[in-house]
Amino acid sequence: MDSLQKIVDILDKECELYSILLDLSKKKTQVIVDADIGELEKIVEMEEHLIFELRNLEDKREEWVTDFAKRRGVTPGDVTVSYLVSQAEGQIQERLKQLQDRLYGIIEEQKQVNQINERLIRNNLEFIDFSIGLITGRGQAGSIYSKTGGADTRQQGRSLIDKKV
């Protein structure tokens, strides 16, 4: 099989896996909102499996790109999807254009979903930190003396958890 066709086949498989990864990220958004830790763990495990598969495909693609580059007398770093489109003809060229557009769309949407998920997780962590602070009395005055050595007029806060220092 021609190295260009092999690259197209691998890009097609990568595109499918990235699409599945995007769907999982979208599902993860609702799971984060619902605070369903068990389901979140399952999704992360599936994502790890997909990333492993993508890494293997990427290694194969790099091998075929190196082969293609040697045959064309260019460096492998110069072989981008745009370059492949310019070198291809007919159906392969059209398929490469479709894959390029689809991959770009998936990557852009993945960035947006990741930003949303990151914000949701950060908000959840801040809420948890705030809740722990309320329960433990963290952030309240720790001594009864002021900087000048006199008694501080602020009242000691009470905590829901008894603690000794």
Image (cartoon, rainbow, N blue to C red):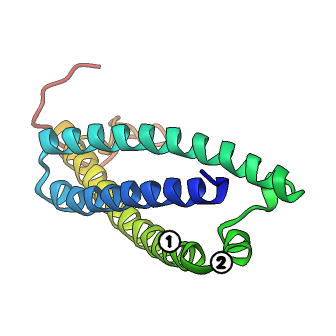
Amino acid residing under circle 2:
Glu
Q: Secondary structure at mark 1?
A: helix
Q: Which residue is drawn at the image coordinates 17% and 61% (left, top)?
A: 30
Would you name the residue on which mark 1 appears? 99
Residue 77 lies, with reference to residue 39, above or below; the image says below
Q: Which residue is drawn at the image coordinates 19% and 23% (left, top)?
A: 163
Q: Residues within 10 Å of mark 1 (few under 14, many from 20)?
A: some
Residue 106: name its quadrant: bottom left
Image-based side of 66 in relation to 64, left or right: right
Rendering coords of residue 45 (x, y %)? 28, 37
Label located before the other in sequence (2 or 1): 2
Q: Nearer the viewer, residue 93 or 122?
A: 93
* Quadrant in the picture for the C terminus: top left
Q: Which residue is drawn at the image coordinates 37% and 59% (left, top)?
A: 16
Would you name the residue on which mark 2 appears? 89
Amino acid residing under circle 1:
Leu
Q: Residues within 10 Å of mark 2 (few under 14, many from 20)?
A: few
Rendering coords of residue 1 (x, y %)? 59, 50
Q: Which residue is drawn at the image coordinates 49% and 77% (left, top)?
A: 98
Label 2–label 1 contact, CB within 8 A: no
Does residue 87 appear in the picture of this structure?
Answer: yes
Rendering coords of residue 123 (x, y %)? 29, 59
Q: Secondary structure at mark 2?
A: loop
Query: Residue 116 — which label?
Result: none
